[in-house]
Every structure is written in C-alpha cells, then in structure tokens.
Image (cartoon, rainbow, N blue to C red):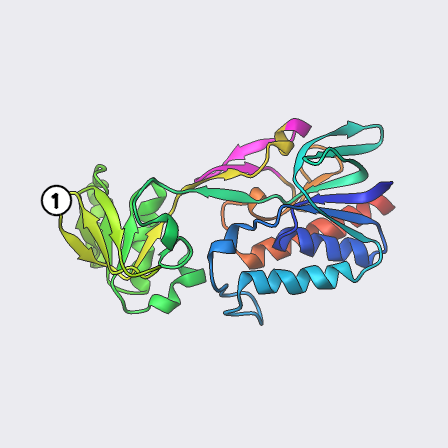
Amino acid sequence: MQYDAIIIGGSFAGLATAIYIARARRTVCIIDTGLPRNRFAEHSHGFFAQDGKAPGEMLAIAREQVAAYPTVSFKSDAAISASKAGDGFEVALASGEVLGAKRLVLAYGISDELPDLPGLAERWGSTAIHCPYCHGYEFSGQKLGVLSLSPMSVHQAQLIPEWGPTTFFLNGQDAPDETIMAQLRARNVVIEPDRVVALHGEGKALSGVELENGRIVETAALYVGPRNRLNSDIAQQLGCEIEEGPLGAIIRTDAMKQTTVPNVFAAGDVTRAAHNVTWAVSDGVMAGSALHRSLVF
C-alpha cells in the first residue's frame, strides 16, 4: 500500500500533523518508537488548556483521538532509512518492513546530550531543567543555579533571576567579558568559578551543587542548556539542508514546514532552536495542512 503521507515520529508534532491529514480524508501512517523527548518530565506547563498535565497522558489521549480516524495507521517501529522512489518515497523500518508514500513528514525529534555530571541524569526534567517558562514557576523564589556549558548559558544566567536568586556556575570555564559580568551583577547573580562535580538531594529533589573544592552551594533547581542531536539522519539521507542552531542541528524548512527537498516536510524540535509543546503542535498543524494542499494542487 502507498500512503498519502508517512510521518516519522509520533509525539506532539507528529500527531498534530496526522490529525490534519486524517481530517482531510487522506491515508497516513505514523511510525513511532514511543520515546518522546519530554518523557523525563512529570508535568508539562504552558500548553493552552492543558497546564500541568503529564506529557505521557497528553500523548495517549492524542494518539487515541488520531487513531479513531479510519485512514490512520500506526507502526510501533523505528524508521532507519528513507529514499526517493518514483513519484514518492520509500521508508525502511528496523523490522525489515518497507513502506511507501507520496509525502514524508520528519517529526522524529531530538535528544539532549547531558554532560557527564553525577546526579544530573536522574534529575533531568525534574530539578535539573532547561526552560524556565516550562518549569520555572514551580521553583519561584527558591535558590536557583545555571550551569555554564556554552555561550547560551550566559543568556540563561541573565534570564533566570526573574524566578529567584541565581548562582551562575562557571564550571571551571572562563568568566564572561566585563560587560556581561556587569549585567550579571546588576541582576544580583552570584558567580561561582569552580568546576561542578556532583548534584545532591533526596531522590529527584535537588538540595545542593557540589564544587571541586568540596563546598556545596544550596540550590533547588539547576538550569542546564545541553547540546542536542537529531534522533535520525533520515533528513541527511534525503538531501535536506541542515542548519547549525545555537545548541544543535536544525532541519531547514520554509513557512509551510517544507524542507529543501520537494514533498518532504518537517515539524517540531527538529526544525527550530526554541522548543516546547505549543510550538511542536503549531508546526504539526502547518505541516499537515500544507502537505494536504500539496496533494491537491
């Protein structure tokens, strides 16, 4: 069977894309590994009318609603390759199955590359966090920290004092220039130059950040801006143009979410430097409706 569209990735962007294609009565197959990026977070915040809900619960409801459309199929599998085939595309799965479609949507998401810091991985998405708009309110007025990993960390350190008293852990790296340091002082940001060696706290809670000199700085939440990577190289296989964002690779798309390869669309975190559920769903809406119009016109 040749589908009208295959969507690689069934999280927020992929499901939002699928429902628009399905409502246009076109056939669509969603390939998904079941490992969304925000599976580490217990709650999602800031998404209209869904504030505070568990991401897994939101996805389960969306998947059930998308699956109710008769032209929708799901494959619980991993797409390992994709290529042009006649007027459409072929997608090979890890199981060995090969699927065909007239259009493709790349919504396979990204993964965060966390630094090798004891105590960080188990707190990721809980008290070791990235986005203050997604998770910062819950730590309002508490002692906060920012871990320096890249030039973008300075931006975090300037922003986070909006939510509480902030320490900028330089983690053994050079201090910013004097202009930036003056801005940080104006925001009452405390600078800790020593390397961070561990995070401490009971369970997923964070109580302190340990420095290499043995001192522990009281901290309730640590902001970390790690680099990220695309979860697949299928965009590169297809010849889609890739741009370098501030923290990782981004698939280039136009306003309609079409990549530089005709009839290949992309949506969600793979297409932008700023990430949250709202943007992912918005991208999916645009990709799904634009894809359908490309089939019509």
Q: In which quadrant will I find the C terminus?
A: top right
Quarter of the view holding residue 57:
bottom right
Residue at (24% x, 51% y) in the render: 168
Left or right of 12 in this view: 126: left
Residue at (34% x, 53% y) in the render: 223
Does 121 appear in magenta?
Answer: no
Q: Position of residue 23 (x, y in %)?
A: 81, 59
* Most foreground residue, 214 or 282: 214
Do we see residue 66 in this rendering? Answer: yes
Is 96 above or below relative to 206? above
Is 185 above or below relative to 2? below
Number of dots carrying numbers: 1
**Type of the residue with mark 1:** Asn
Is 249 above or below relative to 32? above
Q: Tag 1: Cα neighbours inside 10 Å, few (<14), some, or many (≥20)?
A: few
Q: In which quadrant will I find the N terminus?
A: top right
Do we see residue 297 in this rendering? Answer: no
Q: Position of residue 167 (x, y in %)?
A: 23, 55
The residue sitting at the bottom extreme is 49
* Most foreground residue, 178 or 95: 95
Quarter of the view holding residue 16:
bottom right
Q: Tell me the residue that label 1 is attached to.
A: 213
Q: Position of residue 98 (x, y in %)?
A: 77, 34
> Which residues, given as a range, are shown in magenta?
237-252
Q: Position of residue 49 (x, y in %)?
A: 58, 72
Left or right of 182 in this view: 260: right
Residue at (36% x, 44% y) in the render: 152
Does 239 appear in magenta?
Answer: yes
Helix, strand or loop status at disc 1:
loop
Left or right of 286 in this view: 213: left
Residue at (16% x, 43% y) in the render: 212
